[in-house]
Amino acid sequence: MLMIKAIIRPEKTNKVLKALFESGYIAVTKMPVVGRGKQRGIKIGDVTYDELPKEMLIMVIKDEDKDFAISTILDAAKSSPKGAFGDGKIFVSPVDEAYTISRGTKEL
């Protein structure tokens, strides 16, 4: 099992969630976050905004679904066909164990 954390533009959240749902990935956790990437924020006039609002989507998938899930997120999250700075990042990490709290059972 793998955990995918996708940090995306807030205005792309609904499009990404819809694409994931339509692709069969219905279990997703969403939370608002702030941060900056290589662009070091954004400067408008004399004001620099170095913590930009983003959304983080977290999901756990089977190893064999990794490429499809990532391409689904990439296609829905890009701000243009080529993409742009600030579109976000996707992080993938292994999940060693998972438990369902209501049943107290190990899921992996």
Image (cartoon, grey):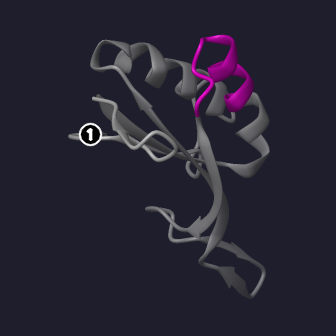
Instruction: Please indicate, yes or no, whether residue 91 appears anywhere in the rendered image.
Output: no
In the rendered image, which quarter contains the C terminus? top left
Compared to residue 68, the image places residue 20 above or below, namely: below
Which residue is at 59% across, 36% downward? Answer: 28
Residue 5 in percent (x, y) is at 45, 44
**Residue lying at the far front of the rendered structure:** 103
**Quarter of the view holding residue 80:** top right
Residue interval drawn in magenta? 16-27
Compared to residue 48, the image places residue 2 above or below, namely: above
Residue 20 in percent (x, y) is at 62, 22
Compared to residue 43, the image places residue 98 above or below, namely: above
Compared to residue 54, the image places residue 88 above or below, namely: above
**Is the residue marked by circle 1 packed among few (<14), some (14-19), or many (20+) residues within 10 Å?**
some
Residues 76 and 17: in front is 17
Residues 46 and 22: in front is 22
Which residue is at 25% across, 41% downward? Answer: 97
Residue 84 within the magenta-colored segment of the rendering: no
Name the residue type under label 1.
Val
Left or right: residue 24 versus residue 99 is right
Residues 85 and 94: in front is 94
**Quarter of the view holding residue 27:** top right
Which residue is at 61% across, 11% downward? Answer: 23
- Under tag 1, what secondary structure? loop
Residue 103 in percent (x, y) is at 46, 39
In the rendered image, which quarter contains the N terminus? top left
Residue 63 in percent (x, y) is at 28, 20
Instruction: Please indicate, yes or no, whether residue 36 appears anywhere in the rendered image.
Output: yes
Residues 6 and 37: in front is 6
Task: Return the residue at label 1.
Answer: 95
Residue 18 within the magenta-colored segment of the rendering: yes
Which residue is at 69% across, 30% downward? Answer: 17
